[in-house]
Image (spheres, rainbow, N blue to C red):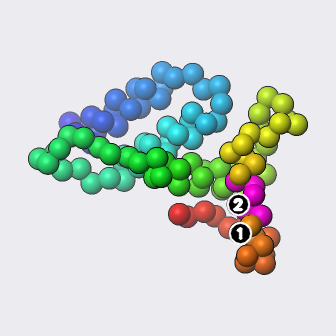
Amino acid sequence: MSDRESFLSKWLEIIRGCTVNNTYKMAWARAITELASEMDYDSSISNMVEITLEQIAHKVLKLYWNQTIYFNLIQGANINLTPEIITWTKELIRKYQGEVNNKQPVRYEG
């Protein structure tokens, strides 16, 4: 098993064992998994993998953007208290749609 496969296998064990009581955990887990699977590994240099918070933020925003812009994602225990990630994502969508002057849903590909 390669270093990459070993890392992903261990990470998937962690994901399968965690409690999922909100979407943040799974969004972070998915972001980290996608980033790790996209990386080029050179185990002769190091067996360490560096994933930055900025990289994770881009992936998490992409997940929430696509769910929100297409499906108007509504979540949270109290529908009157929207989670901040959804509030921020909706604000970014409004700004984007205002700049392009079009309300047509567009996938986030960043």
| Residue annotated with mark 1 | 96
Foreground of the two, 72 or 98: 98
| Residue annotated with mark 2 | 92
Q: Residue at x 27, y 34 (%)?
A: 6
Report the residue that reaches farthest toward the right.
80
Report the residue that reaches farthest toward the bottom.
101
Q: Is 5 located above or below residue 68 in the figure?
A: above
Q: Is 103 located above or below residue 22 in the figure?
A: below
* Left or right of 34 on screen, residue 80: right
Give the class, few, some or many, for how many residues have Cα within 10 Å of label 1's Cα (few <14, many ≥20).
Answer: some
Q: Which residue is drawn at 65% across and 30% down?
A: 22
User: Does 3 appear in magenta?
Assistant: no
The answer to which image quadrant residue 106 occupies is bottom right
* Left or right of 80 on screen, residue 47: left
Mark 1 to mark 2: distance in Å?
A: 6 Å
* Proximity of marks 1 and 2: CB atoms separated by less than 8 Å: yes
Report the residue that reaches farthest toward the left.
44
Say how many tags the image has. 2
Task: Give the amino acid type for the residue marked by disc 1 in the picture.
Answer: Tyr
Give the class, few, some or many, for how many residues have Cα within 10 Å of label 2's Cα (few <14, many ≥20).
Answer: some
Q: Which residue is drawn at 57% across and 33% down?
A: 25
Q: What stretch is highlighted in magenta?
A: 89-94
Task: Give the amino acid type for the residue marked by disc 2 in the picture.
Answer: Leu
User: Does 91 appear in magenta?
Assistant: yes
| Residue 110 placement (x, y as % from top left) | 53, 63
| Residue 94 placement (x, y as % from top left) | 77, 64
Q: Is residue 78 visible?
A: yes
Q: Which residue is drawn at 53% across and 55% down?
A: 58
- Helix, strand, or loop for circle 2? helix
User: Looking at the figure, which quarter contains the N terminus?
Assistant: top left
